[in-house]
Amino acid sequence: MQLFDVYPLNDIEITRASGSNVWDANEQKYLDLYGGHAVISIGHTNPHYVSRLTDQLSKVGFYSNSVKIPLQVQLAEKLGLVSGKKDFQLFLVNSGAEANENALKLASFYNGRKKVIAFTGAFHGRTSLAVAVTDNPKIVAPVNQTENVIFLPFNNEVALEETFKAQGNDISAVIIEGIQGVGGIKEASKSFLQKIRSLCDEYNAVYIADSVQCGYGRTGLFYAHDYAGVEADVYTMAKGMGNGFPVAGISIAPKFKPWHGELGTTFGGNHLACAAALAVLEVMEKDNLMRNAEEIGNYLIAELNKFEQVKEVRGRGLMIGIELPEELSHVKKELLFKHFIFTGEAKPNVIRLLPALNLTRAHADEFLSAFGKLVK
């Protein structure tokens, strides 16, 4: 049997990792500023994280949600404290797509409606509902297509108001990334997020804050959306939640009253997943990683803005997009193969930085030095 060939692969095999560095099979050291799609939040093989998982595995690795799992309660309490959403409720799943899928389903159960507003440039996942609200027709199979999704221009308040006026009583939810990741590190404006909140209140629609990539402290706030000063009804999480272990969740406002069987999962919230997620929050809290993300992010953004060759620097904290002109489209590849630095991308010419939240100033300078050599 062969692997199903859907991933364009770099000819690199990672054999070990520590902090913000990884090593390949030839013992070449790399600086990791991508964290495997924003997944590595507290650094590779963090000692507390490894100890937490190893200890839990020696006791019990898995049992289903048919029994009490105290680790889930501990995780909910810790997450409420660190995120500032103490009165919210937690439902645990395995991936960002599942989190968004369940958030959309929960919204529809809540108000009995079908229509969902999503935005140009959005990426919410690849499962049925999640991909239907993703703005990429290429990955939407015919079976995923639905007339229930309304795509509107990102950050266009007029279009949003007009759509609610025309169809408000049919709209179940609005789903939006606080900062679009795949869409090119494009940030929703404060006024746009505030407008979503007010219109959802007026029409009893559900405001879903997709924080899968832009959440979990990456921007300096726990959820990127919170910089607008309003709360969403549901926050979806994944990526950095488990530092590499598959775990995700939705944080649900108290106005939603659950009933048995409403949502469900086999693997979501298992013992190992909860141990991983707790370890992440414990390290984030102990080492004040949200503040570090803000400080190092501000430094990187300020320094990147000094390069005349850069068209635009976007983002907040350690979620940064560097838009380059076409003639510098080679920079990402050369960062990897000449300077041994992993970064991400968004089409056509945006370099994405999504490093661990404990990235150091020295690592930031290492990147800036290499970047400067390539754009001159």
Image (spheres, rainbow, N blue to C red):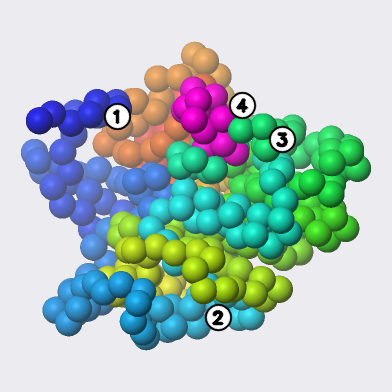
Q: CA distance from mark 1 to mark 2?
A: 38 Å
Q: Which mark is residue 81?
A: 2
Q: Secondary structure at mark 3?
A: strand
Task: From the top left corner, tell me how far across and down residue 195 is, in percent.
Answer: 83, 51
Q: Which mark is residue 286?
A: none
Sequence-first disc among 1 and 2 = 1
Give left or right: position of 171 versus 123: right
Sequence-first disc among 2 and 3 = 2
Residue tagged 1: 7
Residue tagged 3: 150
Sequence-first disc among 4 and 3 = 3
Q: Are marks 4 and 1 in contact (CB under 8 Å)?
A: no
Task: From the top left corner, tell me how far across and down residue 78 is, in percent.
Answer: 48, 80
Q: In the image, which is nearer the foreground, mark 2 or mark 4? A: 2
Q: In the image, which is nearer the foreground, mark 2 or mark 3? A: 3
- Picture residue at 58% right of the left edge, 54% below the top: 105
Disc 2: CA contacts within 10 A as few (<14), some (14-19) or many (>=20): some
The kind of residue tagged 4 is: Lys
Residue tagged 4: 311
Q: In the image, which is nearer the foreground, mark 4 or mark 1? A: 1
**Image: magenta residue range:** 131-145
Q: In the image, which is nearer the foreground, mark 3 or mark 1? A: 3
Q: CA distance from mark 4 to mark 3?
A: 31 Å
- Picture residue at 42% right of the left edge, 83% below the top: 74
Q: Quadrant of residue 294?
A: bottom right
